[in-house]
């Protein structure tokens, strides 16, 4: 676990005139910091994220746009918000995101898992999910669920998620 100042303890100092304005707890991802271009990748639990930047990330993977006022409300009422950042000198970029809702005791559901296409297939999605699960487990939450799009079922299965455990089916109700 590292805090902001340690970001600039290495050769980043040469390029960073002042720190990029990331706040909150920042956590190193073991093995996922490419040495290239002095860039490093961090997690943050700060939920005060620029919604336009989050929208850009969601646009990049082709998700349908959602009203920002509702996204803001969803973030405010989430139990956990995890963002993943690439920091290069004084520049920071939002490259991944996940959040979870919860009853704060037994159950949590993970939503909006996304890694920017430029950063996919490097193990970052897995790291993001593992970090999110760890944070939920730290709160003693044992029942973690999510809704997987068909093309990512195997991604979640590799992380230990099971479809239809004991035949239990997710059921949905939509307005007509
Ligand atoms: C799904 C997503 C988060 C995966 O992120 P990623 O950083 O590319 O994934 P990783 O590189 O960490 O992959 C971890 C493992 O899952 C596998 N994997 C990744 N994407 C996969 C997919 N779509 N289907 C099956 N396996 C997948 C990888 O091969 C890797 O396997 P390994 O552990 O055996 O090496 C990313 O592709 C994404 O943001 N997609 C668009 C948004 C989306 O669909 N989100 C899910 C909504 S439910």
Image (cartoon, rainbow, N blue to C red):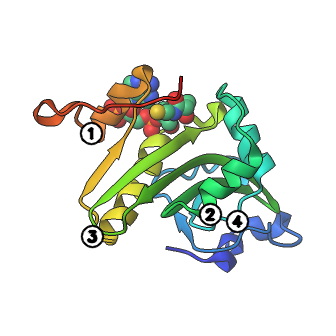
Judge depth for marks 2 and 3 and give the one in front: 2
Question: How would you rate the neighbour count of disc 3 (Cα within 10 Å): few for under 14, some for 14-19, many for 20 or more?
Answer: few
Asked if residue 153 lies left or right of residue 100, the reply is: left
The residue at the point 33 percent across, 71 percent down is 139
**Between residues 94 and 63, which one lies in front from this camera angle?**
63
User: How far apart are the two marked residues, 3 and 1, measured between alpha carbons?
Assistant: 18 Å
Q: Which residue is mark 1?
A: 161
Whether label 4 lies within 8 Å of ligand 1 gets the answer: no
Label 3 residue SS: loop
Q: Which residue is mark 3?
A: 140
Question: Is residue 58 visible to us here?
Answer: yes
Provide residue 70's location: percent of width, then percent of height.
69, 49
User: How far apart are the two marked residues, 2 and 4, measured between alpha carbons?
Assistant: 9 Å
Which comes before the other along the chain, label 2 or label 4?
A: 4
- Discs 3, 4 touching: Cβ within 8 Å: no
Q: Which residue is mark 2?
A: 76
User: How far apart are the two marked residues, 1 and 2, measured between alpha carbons?
Assistant: 26 Å
User: How far apart are the two marked residues, 1 and 4, measured between alpha carbons?
Assistant: 29 Å
């Amino acid at each position: 676990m590292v805090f902001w100042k340690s970001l600039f303890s290495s050769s980043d100092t040469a390029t960073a005139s002042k720190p990029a304005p990331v706040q909150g707890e920042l956590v190193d991802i073991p093995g996922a910091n490419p040495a290239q271009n002095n860039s490093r990748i961090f997690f943050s639990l700060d939920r005060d994220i620029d919604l336009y930047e989050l929208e850009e990330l969601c646009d990049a993977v082709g998700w349908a746009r959602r009203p920002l006022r509702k996204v803001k409300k969803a973030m405010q009422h989430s139990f956990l918000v995890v963002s993943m950042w690439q920091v290069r000198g004084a520049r920071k970029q939002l490259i991944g995101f996940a959040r979870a809702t919860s009853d704060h005791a037994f159950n949590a559901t993970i939503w909006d898992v996304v890694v920017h296409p430029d950063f996919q297939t490097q193990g970052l999605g897995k790291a993001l999910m593992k970090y999110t699960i760890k944070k939920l487990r730290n709160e003693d939450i044992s029942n973690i669920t999510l809704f997987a799009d068909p093309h990512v079922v195997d991604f979640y299965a590799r992380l230990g998620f099971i479809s239809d455990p004991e035949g239990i089916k997710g059921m949905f109700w939509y307005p007509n």
